[in-house]
Amino acid sequence: MLFSTAVVNDRRGNVLGIAGLATDITERKNIEAEITETLKREQQLHAITRSISSTLDIDATLQNIVHSAVEALDAAGGKIKLCNITNGHLEKSYCTNDRDRLFSLLFCPKLFEQVINNGQSVLVPDAAALPEAYPQAVSLGISNLMAVPVINTTETLGVLVVYNLRIARSLTRRDLAFLETIGRNAGVAIQNAQLFAETQRLATIDPLTGVYNRGHFCAIAYREFERARRYNSALSVIMLDVDYFKKINDTYGHGIGDQVLRSVAQSCHSQLREADVLGRYGGEEFSILLSETTLFEAEQVAERLRSIIDQTPVSTKLVLVSVTISLGVAAYDPDCIDLDQLLDRADQACYESKASGRNQVSVWEPSAEHLERSQVGRLASFGCAQDRG
């Protein structure tokens, strides 16, 4: 209520009394509060959109989305999970709290199914009132929660969740609508980050075989070579070449030849460690970098690859193609001056395998001339050390 008063006078100015007026301004105050809240949310949304669009790194994007949503809604915590568009499985996530158990329990199958499969948002204003549906949330002190789909124009990319603890305020339908808007804006930012990541990936991948291209293989190999030289750690390289590949192309066609290359790449990849690096070096030649691997161990790996490919013909729609490979192995040693020399040694060994009948493994061994030069070099280095002493 707004009260106002005024003195009532006659024509001569004598006071006759006081007049009062009471006005109900509740509705006006409510409208003003509504406008203020709307402007605040618009400003928050603008800041959030700017924040989540400020990077093309997918992990940083997810982090910005969750922290922005939690801060804007004054919530206790939150989580975002992306799903694989093809199979619907969750594959990447970020949460504000290091207590992963809390979030894994909170993100129950029922909630996920409702949001992802039906594209519907969920608001649970009182988790304690639905103990059967959200028993883990109640036991962990979560009083209310919201989950909304993260969408782009046509697809649901994941789920964004925020929650409050018992001591925090309640989440409302106004909050849910605001979080849905964040989810839509987040979908655009995530899609941009994913497209950027895919563009970067394609720049490093050989499009035919799906393994690293020569440029990216050499970039990784250079770093590993420098690390091996600095710490004198084991490092080996395998070069392999598909035998009679030109004959395969001439006999069956380039389409079959492409299938052979893909099959060889897949067979090699299946036998290597996650830390090993496989690349298409050029044409029908592949290169493999084996960190922390001695020459003897690398030779065993090469023989295993040779045997598997020899025993596994490539099945095509038209014909079963028998394939063999020739391999060369070399290992880093103090006399190896750079990566190019190490790769060249493995290539020389591969050439030796082809010259000796193919379908075999050869190990690079220093020639007598190389050993003599190495000995001279070591003596010269010793002499320099003596001079410095």
Image (spheres, grey):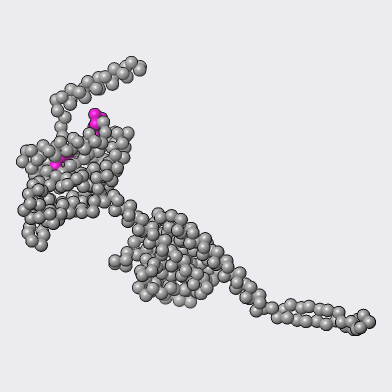
Q: In the image, is residue 338 above or below residue 151?
A: above
Residue 335 among magenta residues: yes
- Nearer to us in this view, 68 or 340: 340
Of the 4 image quadrants, the one containing the N terminus is: bottom right
Q: Is residue 236 left or right of residue 181?
A: left
| Image position of 341 (left or right of 32) | left
Q: Residue at x 8, y 44 (%)?
A: 359
The vertical placement of 61 against 32, above or below, is above
Whether residue 52 is in magenta: the answer is: no
Q: Position of residue 338 (x, y in %)?
A: 26, 33
| Residue depicted at 17% across the width and 42% down the height | 239
Any part of residue 285 in sight:
yes
x, y percent for residue 138: 46, 70
Quarter in which the C terminus is drawn:
top left
Position of residue 94 measured from the top left corner of the image (x, y, whole percent) = 41, 59
Q: Quadrant of residue 290?
A: top left
- The magenta-colored residue range is 327-336
Nearer to the camera, 246 or 358 = 246
- Residue 109: where, in percent of width, then height? 36, 70
Q: How many marks?
A: 0
Judge whether residue 98 can be spotted in this image.
no
In which quarter of the view is residue 326 placed?
A: top left
**Which of the 4 image quadrants contains residue 29?**
bottom right
Compared with residue 65, is residue 29 higher up or lower down, i.e. above or below? below
